[in-house]
Every structure is written in C-alpha cells, then in structure tokens.
C-alpha cells in the first residue's frame, strides 16, 4: 500500500469542494426553476463520466488544471528537476474566493499547491482583453497595433479593461465574489484568448510547483489559519527563480505543442505573455483586495522587469508594447480613493462588453464603487447622521476610528472580542472583505436592520481600514 503524504491528506480534504459545488449548483437551478440549465448540468456530468477522461482525472471541473500539472511536471523533469521531488507535490484548485495561489510545504517533505478559481477567473479577464489586440496583430495590422499600443489605446479604450477589473474588485471587496462581465470576441480572438489563458494558468501553477521543485520553504506559520493569501517568499531572488523556472517549463510545453508549425517561433513570446498576465492578476489581487498584504510577491512592475531582463530582445520589445495598457489599467483598477476612475454601469452595454445580469446589479456595483472612494469626512458624516436611526454608538465608534483607535471602534460596532485581535494584528495580512464581513456581523449582532448593514459596514470598514495598515 502506498503511504499517504501530508499533502495527499490535505488535498483530499480540499478537493471534496467540487461535489458540494455541483450539489449547490443543482439546488440553485431548481430554485430558479431553470429546467434547461439543470438538464445541461446533468448531461455534461453524464458525458464526462462516459468519457475516456473520467478514469484518468478526478473531476470534470478540475481536469484542465490536473492536465496542466502533469505536463508541467514532465517539462520540469526535462529541465533537470528531481522526479522524486516533483512526485511529492500536489495541486488543488480551490473555491475560496480570497485565495490567490500558494505553496504549502509539509514536515514530511511533501507540498501542496493551492490555486483559486478567482485568480484564474482574473487571468481569463486579462487574456480575453489582450487577445483583441493579439488578433489584430495576427491579421496583419501590425503597424496599427503598435501605434495604438504606444498611444495607450491597445485593444480599444483602456478604460474598458479598468472598468472590467473594477467590477471584479468591488464585488470581491464587498461580497468576496469573483464576478465578471462578459467580453464578446470573434472566433479567432476566442482561440487566442483560450491559448493565452492556458499560458497564464500554466505560469501560476508552474510558479508554485517551482518553489517546491527548487526546495524553497515558505513561512506558512506567519499567517492566520482563516486568512488564505499567497505565501510566496518575500525573498525577491527566490521569486525570480520560481518565475524563471515556470517560464522555461511553459515555453518548453508550447514548443512541443507547436513543433512543426510556423507559430513555434513565437513560443517564447506566448509564454512570456502568459507570465505577464499571471503577474498582473496576482498584483491586482494583492493591491486591490488587501488592507495589509503581509509577505507577498514583488509588485508586477518589479517582477515583470526582472523576468524581462532574462528574455531575448524581440520578446522584450513585444512584451513592453503589450504590457503598457494592461499595467496602467491594473494600477487604475486598484486605486481606491477620490482620484479613482469609477466603475460606470454604462460599461455593461458598451460593446464588446456585455452582461446577462439585471441593470440593478450594474447600478449597485457602480454605487458601491463610488461609495468606497468617498473621503473619510463623508463616511464619518454618514455614520454620525445615521446615529439618530440606529443609536449614538454608531457615530461615537466612527469618531474613535477616525482618531486612530480602530480596536475600540470595532468593539463598539459589535465585532466579537475574539475577532478584533486578528483584525488589528499588524503582523497578519488582512483582506478588506474580512473587515467588511466582521462589521456586517457586528451590526447584525447590535440589531441593525439588514437593509442598512451593507452600507454601514462599507463606511465603517473604509474608516477603520486607514488605521489598520
Ligand atoms: Zn512565489
């Protein structure tokens, strides 16, 4: 009998998620009375069970990542990594919306890579947007693409990507939801988007596997158990080492796949774009969703510059042109202040953007985005005026938060005593959503009507966040 490693046991605990997810999807579809959706889900599940893949992979929802993992391990073995070491690392895709990507080393030498659906969703946003200009380039209008890129207009209006990302970030900050608006692409762009997305997911998974393959140990103990964030080493050299190894492995895979095709010459460029997309996704997550980031990856600018130093002149030039707009959009989307370029509900009806969600949802997110970017004085005045409705404690706590006493403010706002310490512990990373949700619970415990808890929590979290960094 093969002895299970610690990573195997943890993997089994986490992978159970998928059965639960399918159960919840069925429940939700029944509630909505969506018979067609229900039939589609059952048909897809049945088709999967009868396919040749079913016996080979754990689950239809994780099969692509399982395949990527297998291929990456083979490529890394070719590049000289130890087969034994690679056999002791496992990869699990998690449903947690507040995880980015992380590698957890265990004391028995095994390792578990944890990658969030949310991070992959974000990669697909970038991949779809970038595929628009990549497709223009492939159709021969290179000059036009380069000129547009230099003017900062690559792939259309850069405000489009900023808007798509702000929609995602606001949903994450307030509800911990990886929500996204659609981007309609033509067939060629769809193909390019899928290919770029594959490169990005390969890079993210590859980076974490590389930490294990290269024997890097992460300081897992520095993080609270319910705070899932990237635990990559803060040692820049190790991050670059992991980035480079992931890049080389993913480039090798493309070269093998495209062998004999003219596109094989562009393998390095494709895997580089995948790496840059992955870096942007992680950077946006860390900058927009966290109040305190703890030990995380170097910024996307530093990280991409380090990687670009290691690649050829041609790839560097190509990447710089393609990176300019997404990088600027990433910075704009993660700016939460009065200077922010706010999400506008009109974006959803501006081609190529679309959504099947009701107009009310767009208005709500636009409203929440504007709200979170208001100045401190506005939030303070709001909570003070609401004191008449909900009690003097609401405004008193707001005053305490503003004067730099967030712990006492949180107590008065109803946050449980045991919950206050981790929120205020400057050594621990903190998600904006965690603070927001603790406040929501606190207001509920203090008897605030449910229609008011979201608004109060967003104002209170904005006030407290400034003193919790
Ligand atoms: Zn790392």
Image (tube, rainbow, N blue to C red):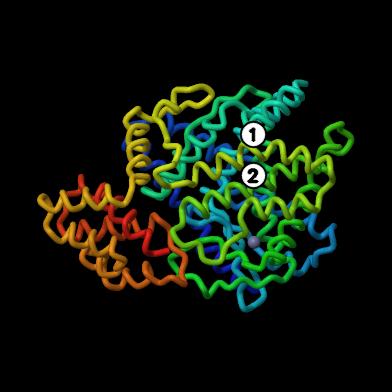
Contact flag, marks 1 and 2 (Cβ < 8 Å): yes
Q: Give residue 96's position: percent from left, percent from top.
A: 47, 55
Picture quarter with the C terminus: bottom left
The answer to whether residue 144 is left or right of residue 355 is right
Res. 263 image quadrant: top right
Displayed quadrant of residue 259: top right
Q: Quadrant of the N terminus?
A: bottom right
Residue at 32% x, 43% y is: 371
Q: Secondary structure at mark 2?
A: helix
User: Which numbered marker is on residue 402?
Assistant: none
Q: Outermost residue toward the bottom?
A: 107
- Sequence-wise, the earlier of marks 1 and 2 is 1
Task: Identify the residue under disc 1.
Answer: 130
Q: Residues within 10 Å of mark 1 (few under 14, many from 20)?
A: many
Q: Is residue 238 above or below residue 42?
A: below
Ligand 1 occupies quarter = bottom right
Q: Position of residue 431 (x, y in %)?
A: 43, 58
Residue at the spot x=47%, y=37% of the render?
Answer: 180
Residue picked out by circle 2: 277
Query: Element type at marker 1?
Result: helix
């Amino acid at each position: 009998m093969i002895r299970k490693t610690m990573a195997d046991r943890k993997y089994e605990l986490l992978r159970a998620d998928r059965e639960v997810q399918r159960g919840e999807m069925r429940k939700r579809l029944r509630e909505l009375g969506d018979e067609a959706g229900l039939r589609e889900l059952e048909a897809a599940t049945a088709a999967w069970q009868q396919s040749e893949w079913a016996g080979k992979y754990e689950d239809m929802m994780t099969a692509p990542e399982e395949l990527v993992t297998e291929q990456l391990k083979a490529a890394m073995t070719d590049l000289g990594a130890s087969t034994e070491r690679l056999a002791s690392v496992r990869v699990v895709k998690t449903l947690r919306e507040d995880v980015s990507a992380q590698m957890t080393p265990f004391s028995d030498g095994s390792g578990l890579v944890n990658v969030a659906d949310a991070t992959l969703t974000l990669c697909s946003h970038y991949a779809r947007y970038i595929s628009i200009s990549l497709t223009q380039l492939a159709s021969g209008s290179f000059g036009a693409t380069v000129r547009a890129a230099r003017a900062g207009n690559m792939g259309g209006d850069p405000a489009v990507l900023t808007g798509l990302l702000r929609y995602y970030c606001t949903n994450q900050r307030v509800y911990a939801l990886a929500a996204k608006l659609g981007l309609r692409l033509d067939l060629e762009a769809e193909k390019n988007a899928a290919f770029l997305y594959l490169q990005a997911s390969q890079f993210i998974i590859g980076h974490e596997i590389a930490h294990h393959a290269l024997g890097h140990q992460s300081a897992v103990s520095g993080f609270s158990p319910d705070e899932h964030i990237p635990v990559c080493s803060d040692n820049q050299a190790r991050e670059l080492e992991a980035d480079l190894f992931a890049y080389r492995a993913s480039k090798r895979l493309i070269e093998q796949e495209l062998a004999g095709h003219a596109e094989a010459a562009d393998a390095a460029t494709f895997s580089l774009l995948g790496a840059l997309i992955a870096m942007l996704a992680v950077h946006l997550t860390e900058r927009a969703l966290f109040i305190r980031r703890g030990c995380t990856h170097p910024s996307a600018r530093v990280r991409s510059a380090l990687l670009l130093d290691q690649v050829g002149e041609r790839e560097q030039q190509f990447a710089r042109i393609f990176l300019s707009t997404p990088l600027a959009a990433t910075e704009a989307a993660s700016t939460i202040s009065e200077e922010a370029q706010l999400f506008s509900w009109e974006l959803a009806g501006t081609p190529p953007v679309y959504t099947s969600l009701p107009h009310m949802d767009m208005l709500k997110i636009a409203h929440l985005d504007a709200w979170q970017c208001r100045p401190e004085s506005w939030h303070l005045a709001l909570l003070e005026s609401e004191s008449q409705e909900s009690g003097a404690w609401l405004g008193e706590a707001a005053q305490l938060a503003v004067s730099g006493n967030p712990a006492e403010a949180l107590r008065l706002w109803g946050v449980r005593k045991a919950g206050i310490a981790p929120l205020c512990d400057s050594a621990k990373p903190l998600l904006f959503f965690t603070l927001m949700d603790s406040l929501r619970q606190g207001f509920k415990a203090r008897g605030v009507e449910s229609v008011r808890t979201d608004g109060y929590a967003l104002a209170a979290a904005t006030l407290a966040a400034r003193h919790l960094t």
